[in-house]
Amino acid sequence: MKTKKLIIIDGYNILNAWEKYKPFLNLSFENARHELIYDMGEYSKLIGIDLLLVFDAYKINFKGTSEVIKGIEVVYTKQNETADQYIEKNWMK
C-alpha cells in the first residue's frame, strides 16, 4: 500500500523567519497569514502533496478550529496549545 505524503508547517515559524512576509506582518498577522495560506496552497498544488498549516492560539482565548483554504488544511490551535504541541500530539505517532 502506498502511503500518502503530507507536509506539516508551523505557520508562525515561517512568517517570522522568511523576509518575504515581513511587510505583511507590519500590516497585521491576519494579512501575513492570508499571504502564507495563499502561497502554501499554490505550492501544494504545484508539487502535488497535501499540506497542513498550523497556527497556534497559544496566548489567545480560543477553542481551536480547522478549515480547508486554497486546498490545504489550516489549523488554529486551542488556547494554551502551541503549534508544536498540536503537531506532536496529532501527527508524530
Image: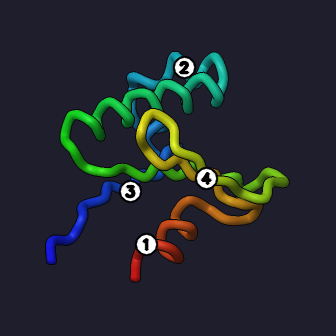
Q: Up-down: is 74 above or below 29?
A: below
Q: CA distance from mark 2 to mark 1?
A: 29 Å
**Is label 1 in contact with label 3 (beta carbons under 8 Å)?**
yes
| Sequence order check, earlier mark of 1 and 3 | 3
Badge number at residue 24: 2
Q: Amino acid at mark 2?
A: Phe
Q: Which residue is mark 1?
A: 91
Taking the image as shown, residue 55 lies to the left or right of residue 72, namely: right
- Marks 2 and 3: which is nearer the front? 3
Residue ID at (15%, 71%) = 2
Verify CB contact (< 8 Å) between mark 2 and mark 1: no
| Residue 65 x/y as whole percent | 68, 54
Q: CB of mark 2 within 8 Å of CB of mark 3? A: no
Relative placement, left or right, of 91 versus 59 is left
- Which quadrant is the N terminus positioned in? bottom left
Residue found at the very far right of the displayed protein: 61
Q: Which residue is mark 4?
A: 66
Instruction: Give the camera-side residue of 55 and 73.
Output: 73
Element assignment for label 3: strand
